[in-house]
């Protein structure tokens, strides 16, 4: 009886380990075998929804002082090379992050914050008057904002949870996506 319960415990732990490994963003990217055979070396895309959801979960796990009943705004991610610009990638990641934060039980109003978050030349987060106006209208306590940067094989994403009252960063998550065809296409469709 003890031996079978040890086997069961070992099997459960193994299964949990496989599940965690499958959900975690990875930095060892597989190459698309069909493209590799054709001599094109582009990494395979990572499941974007799963990655965005995991990033949102990690971000909100750092949010001890966030009240689930007070709104959290989510801004579109900005291109780090042009903070006044986003892309389909920046907008869809913010949409997915907002969805997951709402699924976790936080209040997330549907407000499009395209250019309300900016970073000054010293790379310090600044909240514009639009954020303060929107936060007053929505009674929001915090905003999730971030940037992305496209590189040769990866797109780097940086998310921050910022308290609106004083601009303090309450949490942050940084990760990289392989720059496969879908990710490249989304990153290159700006506004």
Image (cartoon, rainbow, N blue to C red):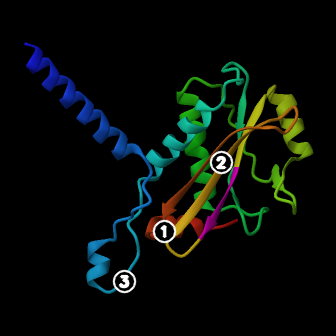
Which residue sits furthest top? 1
> Who's the residue at 39% across and 62% down the image?
28
Mark 3 residue crowding within 10 angstroms, few (<14) / some (14–19) / many (20+): few
Marks 2 and 1, how far apart in space?
Answer: 18 Å
Q: Position of residue 52 (x, y in %)?
A: 52, 46
Q: Position of residue 84 (x, y in %)?
A: 79, 62
Marks 3 and 1, how far apart in space?
Answer: 13 Å
Marks 2 and 3, how far apart in space?
Answer: 31 Å
Q: Position of residue 31 (x, y in %)?
A: 34, 71
Circle 1 sits on which residue?
Answer: 179
- Give residue 37's quadrant in the image: bottom left
Q: Main secondary structure of the magenta part?
A: strand
Q: Is residue 19 left or right of residue 179?
A: left
Of mark 3 and mark 1, the one earlier in the sequence is: 3
Q: Position of residue 156 (x, y in %)?
A: 59, 61
> Who's the residue at 89% across and 36% down the image?
133
The N terminus lies in quadrant: top left
Which residue sits furthest right? 129
The secondary structure type at the circle numbered 3 is loop
The secondary structure type at the circle numbered 1 is loop
Q: Is residue 120 left or right of residue 14?
A: right
Circle 3 sits on which residue?
Answer: 40
Bounds of the magenta span?
Answer: 146-150
Circle 2 sits on which residue?
Answer: 159
The number of numbered badges drawn on the structure is 3
- Residue 149 lies within the magenta run: yes
Q: Is residue 103 above or below residue 178?
A: above
- Residue 9 lies within the magenta run: no
Of mark 2 and mark 1, the one earlier in the sequence is: 2
């Amino acid at each position: 009886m003890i031996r079978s319960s040890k086997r069961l415990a070992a099997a459960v732990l193994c299964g949990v380990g496989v599940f965690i490994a499958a959900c975690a963003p990875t930095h060892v990217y597989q190459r698309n075998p069909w493209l590799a055979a054709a001599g094109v070396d582009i990494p395979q895309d990572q499941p974007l929804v799963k990655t965005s959801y995991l990033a949102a979960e990690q971000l909100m796990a750092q949010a001890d002082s966030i009240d689930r009943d007070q709104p959290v705004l989510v801004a579109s991610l900005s291109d780090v090379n042009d903070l006044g610009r986003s892309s389909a990638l920046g907008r869809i990641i913010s949409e997915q992050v907002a969805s997951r934060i709402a699924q976790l039980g936080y209040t997330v109003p549907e407000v499009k914050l395209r250019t309300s978050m900016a970073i000054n030349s010293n790379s310090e987060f600044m909240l514009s008057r639009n954020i303060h106006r929107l936060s007053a209208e929505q009674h929001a306590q915090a905003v999730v904002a971030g940037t992305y940067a496209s590189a040769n094989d990866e797109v780097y994403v940086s998310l921050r949870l910022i308290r609106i009252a004083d601009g303090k960063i309450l949490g942050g998550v940084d990760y990289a996506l392989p720059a496969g065809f879908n990710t490249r296409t989304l990153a290159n469709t700006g506004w």
